[in-house]
Image (spheres, rainbow, N blue to C red):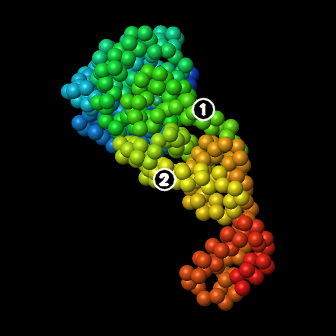
Amino acid sequence: DIGAIADSEKVAVYLVGGMVRDLLLGLPNVDLDLVVEGNGIAFGTKLAKELTGRIYCHEKFGTANLFLNNGLKIDIATARTEYYEFPAALPTVENGSLKQDLYRRDFTINAMAIGLNHHNWGQLIDFFCGCSDLRRKLIRILYNLSFVEDPTRIIRSIRFEKRYDFTIEEDTLRFAQKAIEQNFLERVSANRLKEEFVLILKEKNMIAIFKRLKEMDIWSRILPELELTPGILHFLEHVTEDSSQLTSLLGPVDPGLLTLLLLCHQADEKRVAANIERFQWSKKYNLVLMKTAHEKKKIHAMLQGKDVPISKIDLLFRDLSNETILYFYIVSPDPEQKKIINYLRLRKERIPVVSGKDLKMLGIKPGPVYREILEMLRTARLDGIVQSRAEEISLIK
Ligand code: CTP
């Protein structure tokens, strides 16, 4: 085990960070963070060999990431003191002790360690009263400049506050507010802000975090393009009950992408494009967000139309992602919601049975005409003009 390897390598190894916090809270956590007093990279290399796995080292930072063959991921750091060359930059590393390493961390509840060597196996090391803050349900920084050195911690404090239903301790809150007012968040790179935002999208209490970000005047600093209106919050709050009516018809939906679509609800194409430009979401996300913004007006106009044939709806809807369809459903008034449901039902039921193979058997020469015929059959089926194989064939003839 890790402790035996640490002893044989003559280094002190500690479990630190989120896993210690969650262990004390009795919550599951699978990310193993280790701090090594001594050579972290050498220890990591040994560990990777003994436990069989791959290792990726960052010599400059004295850190290593281990991916064990059993699926476990272990992050290893060399005990260090970090000093910051200028605010919001990556830390520069020099050797130091466990206490200093823990002191440079974000919050007291994340700055505890558990000994893993034989002599102190399982022993809690709590220099900064993290355990007491856990009991008192407080998020507290360790030193006054914490938010200035790493303004993303302002966002993290809110994420933890809402995840555990804790409170941001009074002085900590004041330091956060001051750093916000002094525009420290604006110094953070778009990529780091995006990473923080993606973590929020994964939180169960995402909406409460959104509200708090807005309340603390943070939202507009990290997502200036996407206004968080009461209307959008209302949509977000009703996503689950709205989706339940659609999921069986629709198939899988990526909740993160759906949230982004809803956040883009009030934004015009230009704003959505600006957000994509800054944050560089995944290729799929970028495409879906842009396409939805682009087609929004057309789709609403079509859904509002009277007696629109199903095939017409299909022309606009067939290339839309599940998330986009669900988005339109959520933001539409009742009669339009009914049209979307009806369309999705018919799209599933009314599928032509005649295939390319049948066309060949009918003696039609393969070529672009196949596509045209199959397309015509789809339209005829969707609009209820044909209802059987025989009718399909007679339509072709
Ligand atoms: N940390 C920090 N400052 C940051 C990010 C992280 O001091 N801006 C420290 C904290 O001690 C944290 C540890 O690095 O516990 C690991 O970071 P991360 O994996 O992001 O946080 P977790 O606490 O594990 O949170 P989560 O449960 O969300 O994974």
- Cβ at disc 2 under 8 Å from ligand 1: no
**Up/down of 340 relative to 230, above or below:** below
Label 1: how many Cα within 10 Å (few below 14, some 14–19, many 20+): few
Query: Residue 383 occupies which quadrant of the picture?
Result: bottom right
**Up/down of 20 relative to 368, above or below:** above
**Up/down of 72 relative to 378, above or below:** above
* Residue to which mark 2 is pinned: 294
Local SS, label 2: helix
User: Is residue 237 visible from the viewing direction of this image?
Assistant: yes
| Name of the residue lying farthest toward the front | 306
Q: x and y percent of residue 95 in the render? A: 23, 25
Query: In terms of depth relative to the viewer, which is nearer, 188 or 135?
Result: 188
Query: In terms of depth relative to the viewer, which is nearer, 192 or 81?
Result: 192
Mark 2 → mark 1, Cα distance in angstroms: 23 Å
User: Is residue 124 visible from the viewing direction of this image?
Assistant: no
Local SS, label 1: helix
Q: Amino acid at mark 2?
A: His
Q: Going 52% across and 41% down the picture, which residue do you hit?
A: 265
- Give the left or right position of residue 190, taking residue 84 as reference: right
Q: x and y percent of residue 279 in the render? A: 38, 42
- Cβ at disc 1 under 8 Å from ligand 1: no
Q: Going 61% across and 42% down the picture, which residue do you hit?
A: 331
Q: Split into 4 quadrants, where in the image is the C terminus?
A: bottom right
Q: Are marks 2 and 1 in contact (CB under 8 Å)?
A: no
Q: Nearer the viewer, mark 2 or mark 1?
A: 2
Q: Split into 4 quadrants, where in the image is the N terminus?
A: top left
Q: x and y percent of residue 180 in the render? A: 35, 21
Q: Amino acid at mark 1?
A: His
* Residue to which mark 1 is pinned: 234
